[in-house]
Image: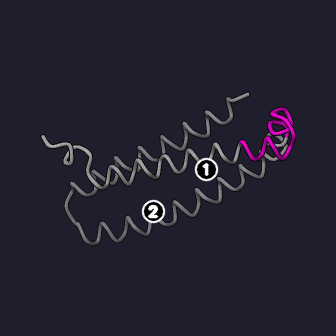
Amino acid sequence: MKAGRLFNRRARRTLLWAVVLIAAAVSTNVVGIQLLGSLDGWQRWLSETSLYFFVWRLLVYVVTIGLWLRMRRRLLAHETGTQARKRLIRAEIAGCLTLVLLEASLSISP
């Protein structure tokens, strides 16, 4: 197979987004550490503001669920087959499981 087919435009775009997000996360941490003077100060600030970040994540989840339900209605109106329903159920289970594991890992972290 050609390398172009294995690494198509969508995969390149996804990889680019992943690199950009990781770079933004690393940059945010470096700037935070520099602004607060030390890694201990940065960690203390993160722990003191964790409730605000939790509320922010809940708001993001609520908006995401609302948009998902809207998209789900449109998709089911457009595709009436049982395959579409099965795909949606698998995606919903995967999404919910991902969020539960993410929140569990955040609450377990020291």
At x 27%, y 51%, the residue is 86
- What residue is rendered at 84% in x and 47% in y? 35
Question: Circle 2 — which element?
Answer: helix
Task: Say left or right for 45 vs 23.
Answer: right
In the depicted structure, whether residue 33 falls above or below residue 83: above
**Residue 84 at x, y = what percent?**
25, 57
Quarter where residue 88 is shown: bottom left
Q: Looking at the picture, which amino acid does disc 2 mark?
A: Trp
Q: Is 16 placed left or right of 48 in the picture? A: left
The answer to which of marks 1 and 2 sits earlier in the sequence is 1
Residue 24: which disc?
1
- Secondary element at image label 1: helix
Q: Position of residue 8 (x, y in %)?
A: 26, 51
* Residue for badge 2: 68
Q: Nearer the viewer, residue 88 or 47?
A: 47
Q: Residue at x 41, y 50 (%)?
A: 92
Q: Is residue 85 inside the magenta stretch?
A: no
Residue furthest out toward the left: 1
Q: Residue at x 48, y 66 (%)?
A: 67
Judging from the image, the colouring scheme is one colour
Q: Position of residue 20 (x, y in %)?
A: 52, 51
How far apart are the two marked residues, 1 and 2, measured between alpha carbons?
A: 26 Å
Can you tell which quarter of the image residue 106 is in? Answer: top right
Which amino acid, mark 1? Ala
Q: Residue 54, relative to residue 73: is it above or below?
A: above
Quadrant into which the C terminus falls: top right
How many numbered discs, if any? 2
Residue stretch in magenta: 30-44
Residue 36 x %, y %: 86, 43
Q: Please state which of the two labelled residues, at mark 1 or mark 2, is closer to the viewer.
A: 1
Tag 1–tag 2 contact (CB < 8 Å): no
- In the picture, the quarter occupied by the N terminus is top left
